[in-house]
Amino acid sequence: MENKVIMISDKDSVAVALSEIKAGEVVNVNGNEITVQNDIPFGHKIALFDINENENIIKYGHPIGHARCDIKQGEHIHVHNLKTNLDGVLNYEYKKNEQVFEPFKGKTDYTFEGYVRKDGKVGIRNEVWIVPTVGCVNTTAKILEEQAKKMFGDQVDDICAFTHNMGCSQLTKDHERTQHILKGIINNPNAGAVLVLSLGCENNNLEVFKPVLGDYDQDRVKFLITQDVEDEYEAGMDIMKELVEYASTCKRETVSADKLVMGFKCGGSDAFSGITANALCGRINDRVVSLGGSTVLTEVPEMFGAETLLMERAVDRETFDETVDLINNFKNYFTKYDQTIYENPSPGNKKGGISSLEEKSLGCTQKGGHAPVVGVLNYGERVEKCGLNLLIGPGNDQVSCTNLVASGVQMVLFTTGRGNPFGSPVPTVKISSNSKLYERKTNWIDFNAGQILEGKTFETVTDEFFRYLLDVASGKKTKNEERGYKEISVFRDGVIL
């Protein structure tokens, strides 16, 4: 009998449809034949046995909610008969992490060709970036980008202006958050040189921004106040020429994989994201950490319901407490605006088979693998510790990827079940959860994790994917780079004057 469903854990009360299944069809799960009671869409869940009203429904070996009513074996399980168990801000109890993180037992002398910076950080691109302090000079930045590409584009990997609509009329914490995010972007090691472009009268003017930026390499970072010059394009191009000349002196050299810093993100998830693409990223996460590298996991709302699995891996009490604050502060952000904390799955998620935030979170946190949690990062705070770091940020793709870039990641691994062309300032590797998406959107997707559903082992696909990522780190362009999808979006929470 053809394998029409997949069961993730032997503790599960549901299986996931590998294709559309019609009512009356019979599926085989671990030798048990189950007659399907309703049409089951691709990626949706089917009950493996009778489930009573209020009984927990199990997927990934953990509850993803409870039954709203009695559910019969073979019935379709989705939002109509499943309800979240989550409610309110929780209290958490610290328990010393006794788990042993198994070191990688395969090849350990992995290398890539990167750009070693003066501060010891390693970039995987050598680009010249234009970072506006305020949205008023966005078009100026884009014109300078266009002119500089025509004149100097062949001397560095790319020349990019990252426009945004913040930097003025913001108050206190919002203003400070914008400054720290821009500081983090400027310090990302993929930027060989940076022009910080200012209007001059904005809240985030250089007089107040430079102290936040702190010490900087005067050859690598230069500034222009457009109100202070007669022709900002002429002055800007003079500075761009200097910056390109400086950046072009940097050359790739062989460095160890312990210099890798990878960020993890998902967007447009489906029911297979947690089974294939996110689980694959979890294995990459563990491999990078075991080799001495650093990884960053964000999207705090998509940790809700699975946060205890991360807290259990905190390396010490301080990291545990910081993780609790990360989770509860973001819940308070929701309640401050009278929003339901646990109503997170988007319409696309639901259409793809995800029924509750627990289900989404358990799938999302698969990207974190099993590595110990070594730190919690705030906006613009730079990765300094080897291991898995948790980063503040919402589920929004553009905002959370911007936060990742500001934390210093060299690339973002972005899993998707429905597809998304978005790209961040750093290489944004799109991993499809299913082969249909990979085959249909070849101009978006870089790697197909759907192979795992078709007979390839995780070990084989993980090795193949890691080799691909080392190629990306050494200069191979991702789809977002080939098409120029490079954007930022700065998180805002407050009054605009």
Image: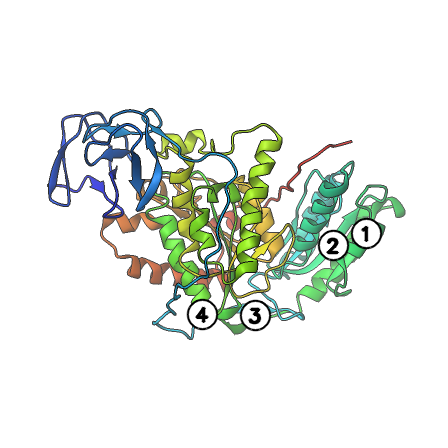
Q: Secondary structure at mark 2?
A: strand
Lower position in the chain sequence, tag 4 or tag 2: 2
| Residue 492 place in picture, x, y as percent | 66, 38
Contact check, label 3 and label 4, Cβ < 8 Å: no
Q: Earlier in the sequence, mark 2 or mark 1?
A: 2
Q: Is residue 203 above or below residue 218?
A: above
Q: CA distance from mark 3 to mark 4?
A: 21 Å
- The answer to whether mark 1 and mark 3 are in CB contact below 8 A is no
The residue carrying mark 3 is 252
Q: Earlier in the sequence, mark 3 or mark 4?
A: 3
Q: Residues within 10 Å of mark 1 (few under 14, many from 20)?
A: some
Q: Which mark is residue 195?
A: 2
The mark lying in front, picked from 3 and 4, is 4
Q: Nearer the viewer, residue 49 or 168?
A: 49
User: Any mark on residue 291, and which?
Assistant: 4
Q: Amino acid at mark 3?
A: Arg
Q: CA distance from mark 4 to mark 1?
A: 41 Å
Residue 469 position (above or below residue 335): below
> Which residue in the protein does label 1 denote?
224
The quarter of the picture where the N terminus appears is top left
